[in-house]
Amino acid sequence: MEKVLEVRNLKKRYGRFEALKGIDIDLYKGEIFGFLGPNGAGKTTTVEILEGLRKAGEGEITFFGHKIHGQTPSFVKERIGVVLQETRFLDHLKVKEVIELFASFFKNAKSPEEIIKMVQIEEKAEDFTDNLSGGQRQRLAIATALVNDPDIIFLDEPTVGLDPQSRESVWQLVRDLKKSGKTVFLTTHYMEEAQTLCDRISIIDRGRIVASDTPKNLIRKYGGKSEIDFMCAELPSKSIIEELRSVDVVDDHFRIETDDITTTLEGLVEWSKRNSVKITDISLVEPTLEDVFLTLTGRGLRD
């Protein structure tokens, strides 16, 4: 795989506070990379350094095979697109005018018509930005990051505050960017979003990368056990219940934790037949990326 970004031993201090304590990141062409972390973990500092909005303290950053020293060079800015967590537009500019304005900042920009079609806001091209819905404004923000046909797109919390339909629209746009060979660097607090979209994920906490892998592998390593929840038509006797291993009972509700769902389900069916117990309302609860996040970063609230 072609590496488009390499970060080695990146550090950053604010006075005595060490925001980044030497992190490594690899980014490859055509992938969606998720960068997750709780508030104050160093996520924003990292992203702003990579976007050229903040200077690094120590470490090496290599874009497209070229090491970056000091200020981000123009050839890198021509090849990246940035969507900030909140983008504000002038209310008295039309959608097409906003895209034309951003296109004027680059040497080789796509046509506004092409970009408008890409983000599916053709019917709003002649509308003023203050008449757009939240989802439409977010698609316009993404459009401004695509005018230079970038190789890497940084998306910072792209679906905050959006309704489910608008969120799915943004998700599909991100998938389309990947299909076209673009690389997406995604930050989000929505674990479902990261688990659904990302090929790889790094989790940062207290200025250090605490885990990096595919969502599936992270869940396998850190997500904990699966749970089988079920109820019975009639409450079995205590001796019959005790035949089940690792079962928790609350009133008529049963829960079994397991590392092997298939074997446990087979044993549960055999138990029910052997004891003539009718199982009802059975459900499977599998660990998610949210479980991984809480395991690695803790469950205490941080501001």
Image (cartoon, helix red, strand yellow):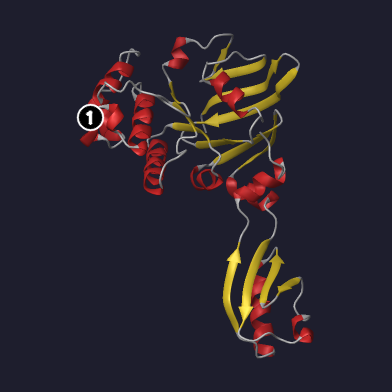
Callout 1: helix, strand or loop? loop
**Whether residue 275 is situated above or below residue 131 in the rendered picture:** below
Q: Position of residue 255 (x, y in %)?
A: 68, 70
Seen from the viewer's position, the closer of residues 270 and 125 is 125
Observer-nearest residue: 107 or 287?
Answer: 287
Rendering coords of residue 159 (x, y %) = 45, 39
Dot 1 alpha-carbon crowd within 10 angstroms: few under 14, some 14 to 19, many 20 or more: some
Residue 240 horizontal side relative to residue 26, left or right: right
State whether residue 77 is above or below residue 276.
Answer: above
Residue 262 in percent (x, y) is at 63, 70
Hey, which quadrant is residue 107 in on the image? top left
Position of 72 relative to 51 (above/below): above
Residue assigned mark 1: 127
The amino acid pointed to by label 1 is Asp
Q: Would residue 97 be found to the left or right of residue 31 on screen?
A: left
- Asked whether, in this view, residue 126 is left or right of residue 230, the answer is left
Instruction: Please tell me in which quadrant of the rendered image residue 109 appears.
Output: top left
Q: Which residue is drawn at 66% across and 22% down?
A: 8
Q: Position of residue 148 (x, y in %)?
A: 35, 21
Q: Which residue is drawn at 70% across and 63% down?
A: 259
Q: Which residue is drawn at 60% across and 63% down?
A: 285
Q: Quadrant of residue 233?
A: bottom right
Rendered residue at 71%/66% (across/down): 257
Q: In this orientation, which residue lies closer to the viewer: 263 or 191?
A: 191
- Front-most of residues 186 and 255: 255
Q: Locate the C terminus by quadrant.
A: top right
